Structure formats: C-alpha cells, structure tokens
Image: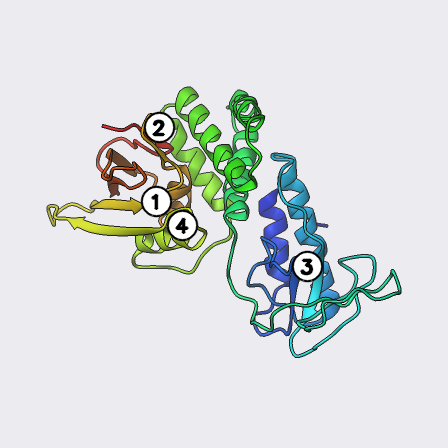
C-alpha cells in the first residue's frame, strides 16, 4: 500500500527503480519526463507500470496544492524499441522512441514520435517549484502552524488571478510561501520546518561542496542563469563557512522585496542537514536588477536568518 504523502509516494517509486533497467517513463503527448520519475529506470514492464501509477498519484497529490500543475499522460517506454502501441490507459502500456508521429486509425492505439535520446535527469522549472512547494505544504500541515498553510494559499490565489503563464505561476507560489513564512514564523521556527521539508525530498548523493551542487541544480531548472561563489576567509578554529554568492538572472529577485531564498535553502538542506544557515546583505548589482549578491554562511554561530527571503539593503 502506497502512503498518501509526497515523501511516501516518492520513496515507493524509488524503491521500484533499477538504474540498469531498460524501461522509463514519459508523457505520451509531449515526450517530457515527468517528475518525480525523471532519470528513473525500471527492470521490467509491470514494474514500470507500477511506477507510472505512482507518478500519477504523486502529481495528483501535488495538484491539491496547485490546480495549475501540468497534466501528463504517463506512459512506459523501452530502449531500442522504435515503435510501440499505446492503449487508452496511459499507464498500462508502453511507447518508445520511434520517429513516426502519427495517430493510427484505431482510436485505441497511437504511434508517437520522440527523439532517440537517453532519458536524462532534466527537470522543468514547474516540476522543481512544485516539488519544493509540496514538501513545504505537507510539513506545515503536519506541524503546529496550520494557519500558515491557509494563509499561503490565500496569498497565492490572490496573485494567481492576474497571471496566466505556468512558469510565472509556479514562481509566485514559492514567493507566496516565502511571504507568509516570513510574516508568521520567526527564523528559529522556520529552520526545523524547512529541514523537515527538505527531508521529504529524495536523498541526493553526498557532496563535499553542497552549496556548489545546490546552485548548479537551481541553474539546471532555469531558476537562475549563472552564479559565482567567492569564499570568505574565516577563522580556521571555527566550523562555519561563508561565501559571497552572486546569482545572475535570478527569477525570484525583486528590487522592492529582495531575494526569495526558500528554494535555495531547502535544496541546500538536502545536502547539508545543518539548519544554522544565515543569508544576509542582499543587493542588486546590475542596472536591470536581475543579478543579486548576498552573503551565505553555513554552520553559523548566529541564529538562523534569511531562510525564506532577504530584503534588499
């Protein structure tokens, strides 16, 4: 029996996966790899079908938090199989990377065209944002801060009424979360909540440079265009580490409100389970106010700060 939380479903899906398997999942209409199954492979078709059902269940759970989440027809694909027929039930059969792109006369069968690339680890901005948002929503809902969940949705729905772009909507969802978390919780209350939210996401490989890996992930989903890290010299006798971080074309930076740091912090906490993070001294460093610079410290001796947003100086 699969659990009902995003974390339960993701763990079930990852337990089904086999990194050497020939089967993987795609959207039957667009060819995109749907989160949370991006990069996952399966040993056989029945297991892949179970993975498709889990993927659809995961996305249905996310849709409770945001009805705008894109809908995918999740299907099973197999390597080295040029064409395959797909039944009306998207998760019940497979389609592979053929090159015909035609719909058959039989309404129960479709031949689809996809480029013959290896399924990779690409993830869209929308899927990334909703994974972060879903983990925060579930953590808040299970905490003593239930009023925050309602406040986030009220703020988001008010903003969403004026926006049509799916990418823009998912960004505003994270912005709404940051606004209400900052407004209603002290940083000391935010820290354990964000750590618990990070632990709901899949465990990444260990890294000696968690901040570098974190920023690379944000860049890969187009949350920022580029970044630089400059290590700040500190006393060798202390464990804290500090950097001046520069984010170019950061999608969650605004001149009037500063920088939303929520997705950065949650992603960083996946690699570094030390909630004593401080982010400060945010300022725009270019004319169009899309490039931001701030100071980030891990294992800080100070109280946590800047965990969800940092106002401009």
Q: Please, what secondary structure does the residue beneath circle 1 have?
A: loop
Instruction: State how the image is colored.
Output: rainbow
First in sequence: mark 1 vs mark 2: 2
Q: Please, what secondary structure does the residue beneath circle 2 have?
A: helix
Picture quadrant of residue 158:
top right
Residue at 40 percent of width and 41 percent of height: 251
What is the number of the mark on residue 188? 2
Q: Is residue 266 left or right of residue 169?
A: left
What is the number of the mark on residue 119? none
Instruction: Report the mark closest to the observer, 1 or 2.
Output: 1
Residue at 52 percent of width and 65 percent of height: 120
Judge whether 134 appears above or below 205 on screen.
Answer: above
Q: Is residue 122 left or right of residue 259?
A: right
First in sequence: mark 4 vs mark 2: 2
List the residue tagged with mark 1.
249
Separation (CA) of disc 1 from disc 2: 30 Å
First in sequence: mark 3 vs mark 2: 3
Separation (CA) of disc 1 from disc 4: 12 Å
List the residue tagged with mark 3.
51
First in sequence: mark 3 vs mark 1: 3
List the residue tagged with mark 4.
218
Q: Residues within 10 Å of mark 1 (few under 14, many from 20)?
A: many
User: Is residue 4 visible in the rendered structure shown here?
Assistant: no
Q: Residues within 10 Å of mark 4 (few under 14, many from 20)?
A: many
Q: Is residue 70 left or right of residue 254?
A: right
Proximity of marks 1 and 2: CB atoms separated by less than 8 Å: no
First in sequence: mark 1 vs mark 4: 4
User: Is residue 257 visible in the rendered structure shown here?
Assistant: yes
């Amino acid at each position: 029996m699969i659990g009902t939380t995003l974390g339960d479903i993701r763990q079930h899906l990852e337990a089904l996966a086999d990194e050497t398997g020939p089967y993987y999942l795609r959207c039957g209409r667009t060819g995109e790899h749907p989160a949370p199954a991006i990069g996952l492979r399966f040993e056989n078709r029945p297991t892949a079908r179970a993975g498709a059902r889990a993927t659809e269940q995961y996305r249905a759970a996310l849709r409770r938090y945001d009805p705008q989440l894109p809908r995918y027809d999740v299907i099973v694909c197999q390597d080295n199989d040029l064409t395959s027929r797909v039944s009306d039930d998207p998760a019940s059969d497979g389609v592979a990377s053929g090159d015909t792109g035609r719909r058959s006369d039989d309404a129960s069968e479709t031949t689809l065209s996809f480029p013959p690339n290896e399924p990779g680890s690409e993830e869209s901005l929308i899927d990334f944002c909703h994974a972060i948002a879903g983990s925060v929503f579930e953590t808040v809902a299970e905490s003593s801060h239930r009023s925050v969940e309602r406040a986030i949705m009220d703020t988001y729905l008010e903003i969403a009424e004026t926006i049509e772009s799916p990418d823009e909507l998912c960004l505003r969802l994270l912005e709404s979360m940051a606004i209400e978390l900052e407004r209603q919780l002290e940083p000391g209350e935010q820290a354990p909540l964000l750590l618990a939210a990070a632990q709901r996401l899949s465990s990444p490989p260990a890294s000696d440079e968690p901040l570098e890996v974190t920023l690379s992930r944000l860049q890969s989903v187009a949350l920022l265009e580029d970044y630089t890290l400059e290590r700040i010299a500190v006393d060798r006798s202390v464990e804290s580490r500090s950097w001046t971080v520069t984010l170019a074309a950061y999608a969650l930076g605004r001149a009037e409100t500063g920088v939303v740091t929520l997705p950065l912090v949650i992603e960083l906490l996946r690699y570094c389970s030390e909630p004593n993070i401080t982010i400060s001294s945010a300022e725009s460093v270019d004319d169009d106010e899309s490039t931001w610079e701030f100071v980030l410290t891990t294992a800080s001796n100070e109280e946590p700060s800047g965990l969800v947003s940092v106002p401009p100086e």
